[in-house]
Image: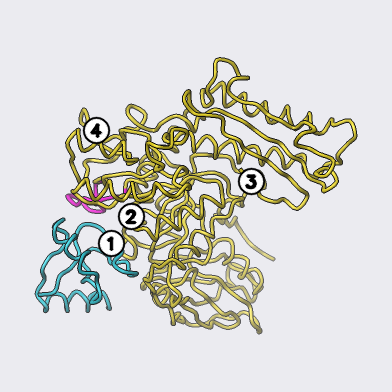
Amino acid sequence: MPKVLTGHAELIGTTMVEPGQPLPKDADKDLIKRLEAEGRLADVKPADLKAAEEDSDA
Amino acid sequence: MPRPGVTVELVEDAPSGQAVLDSGQAFFAGVAERSPDHAIRVSSLSEYEANFGARSGGSLLYDSAAAYFTEGGAVLYVSAVAGPAAETATGTLAPFTVNARGAGEWGNQVAVRTEDASATGGAGAVQFVVAYDGTDVERSPALTSPQALVTWAQTASRTVTLTYTTGSLAPVAAVTLSGGADDPTVDATALKAALDRFPYELGPGQVAIPGLATQLAYDALFEHVDDTRRVALLDAPDSPDSLVVGAAATGLQTDARSRYAAMFAPWAIYPGPATGVTVTVPYTAVQAGLLARLDAQTQNPNLAAAGVNGITRGAIGLTQTWTDTERETLNTQGVTVALSKYGTIRTYGARSAAGPAELNWMWFGGAREVMAVAHEADAIGENFALKQIDGQRVLFSQLNSALKGMLLDHYRRGALYGETPEEAFNVNTSASVNTPATIAAGEVHAVIRLKTSPTAEWVHIVVIKTALDRPLAA
């Protein structure tokens, strides 16, 4: 299931990810573990994620 | 030109020609919705929003600017970090080329048009109208010459700049700008480019990349403050594990430049943009505001914005809570920790990132005092750099008294330590520093020695002014 960032924006690799946005595909595994431990990742349904992306494109 | 009534135009302040010596000013770099290619001085959140866009395009920087102003900050220089692929939206509205002010996709929502204004401005007059996201946001006065419109855009528009190509003014239907693109890449090159937009001449202050708790950001800040004689505020990772936070600080202590930096943890919680919503703010932004408030009240950069002097106005919580032991350990490792006490959120500590082994530099106030003195001494030296050097050394003794006068002010405010002024500071402009060789080179030298704390040794600041305005070496 895709995961989105919660809390505040985070620099992941060289990409700044805003809360509510999905993690980049090449995100570092250690960083994902840390974010998971901090409760900073939320599961979203693929359909919701697609809708959110379409909203942001509009 | 017939112009009935009065047209009022609001224009941002022109930069002052004087040296800026407000040690409370802050410099923030970060990702924003709009990425202008230069740093912009803002003094309120609405001014930030007008220049750097909405919160959604860069929430960390937006929330940081908001917290800085809430806590009492007055002057903030902002520089947007953008990757190399960021593009500025552009369009053609005869007789102009229109560019969005700052790169980014936001520019594709800007539409521009010119309307007939001959009724109010006389024959041939037009008004230039800028719309954003379907709503008119800016409108020029009725003007008759293309040059006047270019000047209007330059001085009054927050959204577009105009370049005159050829032709005359006429009403033209709306044109939407296009080609704007974001590039969220934040790498060493992008960070350096953003920080380089804060040149030495803007004066002393606190520099931060709020929320970026990575070695990349720390290195970029160290290099910047080493060049500009400012101080850096570093965010620790927003981690519940105090060992992770402590490791971030101890990892910096082999770098001598860490004496001009301080690290802060945890992050603060502030009321958010809507009722019932909170946001987490990097503590560097909070501390920058607290320092600005205290500097304005006391004019003493060596005073710690901590304890009763470090109580936040707007924070309602902290992201992490640690035990007293964990907090004390972090403090000795060079992390300044905020805590909740008596119902308020406050900074509790004033360590530099240099760590406990650097007895001279373990307190951050000392680094800030050296920063303030170095910039003020440079500004004073400016008055002497272009003068004829005389045989009787009158010039050097005048420089000596001017520097001593400045240091005496610092001493009276309690920023320098000693039973007497002589124990606290000393200025040397004698023949030992102004040698025949330096005089022949057209240089004016001064060596300042000062004590920033009862335990610290003398700190030396060497001021060298030449007619070429070379930055001082410390």
Please name the residue shown 62% across and 23% down the image. Answer: B408
The disc at residue B344 is 4
Q: CA distance from mark 1 to mark 4?
A: 27 Å
- Amino acid identity at mark 1: Glu
Please name the residue shown 67% across and 64% down the image. Answer: B2
Q: Position of residue B386 (x, y in %)?
A: 80, 45
Asked if residue B100 is positioned above or below residue B449 in the image, the reply reads below
What element does badge 2 sit on?
Answer: loop
Task: Please provide the residue range marked out in magenta.
Answer: B270-282
Q: CA distance from mark 4 to mark 3?
A: 41 Å
Question: What's the chain of the residue with tag 2?
Answer: B
Residue B425 in the figure: left or right of residue B185: right
Q: CA distance from mark 2 to mark 3?
A: 31 Å
Pointers 1 and 4 within a single chain: no
Select label 4 or label 3 by which is in front.
Answer: 3
What element does badge 4 sit on?
Answer: strand
The disc at residue B211 is 2
How would you rate the neighbour count of disc 3 (Cα within 10 Å): few for under 14, some for 14-19, many for 20 or more? few
- Colour used to depict chain A in the structure image: cyan
Find disc 1 in the rendering and name its residue: A10
Select label 1 or label 4 by which is in front.
Answer: 1
Find disc 3 in the rendering and name its residue: B473
- Colour used to depict chain B in the structure image: yellow
Q: Closer to the N terminus: mark 4 or mark 3?
A: 4
Asked if residue B437 is positioned above or below residue B190 in the image, the reply reads above
Assign the C terminus of chain B to one quadrant of the image: top right
- Amino acid identity at mark 4: Thr
Question: What's the chain of the residue with tag 3?
Answer: B
Q: Closer to the N terminus: mark 2 or mark 3?
A: 2
Q: Tell me, yes or no, whether the highlighted magenta stretch contains residue B274.
A: yes
Q: Are marks 1 and 2 in contact (CB under 8 Å)?
A: yes
